[in-house]
Amino acid sequence: MSMITVEHLAVSYGHPNRPTRVVDDVSFEVGANETFGLIGESGCGKSTILGALAGRNRQWTGRITIDGEVIGAKRTQEQLARQQMVFQDPFGSLHPRHTIGRILLEPLEIHGIDDRQTRVEAVLRDVGLPVNFRYRFPHQLSGGQRQRVAIARALILKPRILLLDEPTSALDVSIQAEILNLLKDLRQRENLTFILVSHDMAVIAHLCDRVAVMQNGVFVETVTKQQILEGMVTHPYTKVLMDGSRGYTPKKLPTKTRGDVRISV
Ligand SMILES: Nc1ncnc2c1ncn2[C@@H]1O[C@H](COP(=O)(O)OP(=O)(O)OP(=O)(O)O)[C@@H](O)[C@H]1O
Ligand SMILES: [Mg+2]
């Protein structure tokens, strides 16, 4: 079953009278419990697509269907809760003067959900953090722990979909695989569907079933994980991305986790 269907999506920024279109005629489907990847050069429109799906970018045309419902211009609280974003920089995305507990309570308050303390404790356990971390501030956590908090905040409203925007690229190389494995576990346990943006083919191959390769606001090719692993890609730009990942992945990842994440070398 398809969890997300995007048909002829175009997204613009700027004044409605003089819009700049940055995503053009993009179509894809993501099955329930699948991870769909988006890869491509900086500025090609990856975050813009996630923003449109999350309800952050409103200037879009085309058709988006999420969990069987066609998404309109205005969304209900329930529709907004259904998909949550996780950003690249866990420090920037967590309020520095709020405790972890407060950061996690906020979405529950906004959505009027009860049983808050129990939910906060449960979600901290789900992401592998001690429950007493709720009394800490973001600066008292490591980068990896902060990204676990960002994932917990995304999960606390019990979404069906996580939109992951470079979730490991700001992290120390030694903990990138740890966070990717956590995401993989959560996807299974909570039956989640992911869209994962990354510039790293190794990260994509670790988590994604299929990946769309983007250039200048359009999809140039969509390939399966198997095609990536076997090097069976056709578009020259996909080949460039794969060669780039091959070159630096083995050096970048520590020996312990290298086999886990790398693509063929
Ligand atoms: N709020 C905005 N207002 C105007 N233009 C924007 C805005 N956000 C992004 N853009 C432009 O839209 C294009 C796509 O940006 P987007 O952030 O989606 O790229 P990206 O693929 O996520 O890049 P990166 O890999 O660097 O994160 C870029 O040209 C960018 O400058
Ligand atoms: Mg981006």
Image (tube, rainbow, N blue to C red):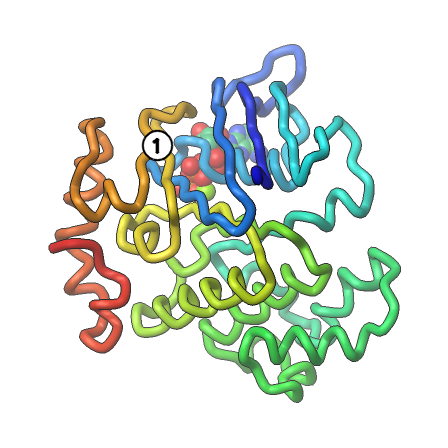
Viewer-closest of 207 and 151 = 207
- Label 1 Cα crowd, 10 Å radius (few <14 / some 14-19 / many 20+): some
Q: Is mark 1 within 8 Å of ligand 1?
A: no
**Image quarter hosting the N terminus:** top right
- Give above or below for 237 relative to 201: above
> Which residue type does callout 1 highlight?
Thr
The image position of residue 258, as x and y in percent, is: 22, 68
The image position of residue 18, as x and y in percent, is: 60, 12
The local secondary structure at tag 1 comes to strand
Image-quadrant location for residue 159 = bottom right
The image position of residue 68, as x and y in percent, is: 69, 35
- Give above or below for 59 relative to 242: above
The image position of residue 20, as x and y in percent, is: 53, 18
Task: Please give left or right for residue 2 compared with residue 170 in the image.
Answer: right
Would you say residue 101 is visible in this rendering?
A: yes
Would you say residue 10 is visible in this rendering?
A: no
Viewer-closest of 107 and 177 = 177
Task: Please give the residue where the numbered disc 1 appears in the rendered image.
Answer: 222
Viewer-closest of 207 and 92 = 207
Task: Please give left or right for residue 263 compared with residue 88 in the image.
Answer: left
**Image quarter hosting the C terminus:** bottom left
- Give above or below for 42 relative to 260: above
- Give above or below for 65 relative to 206: above
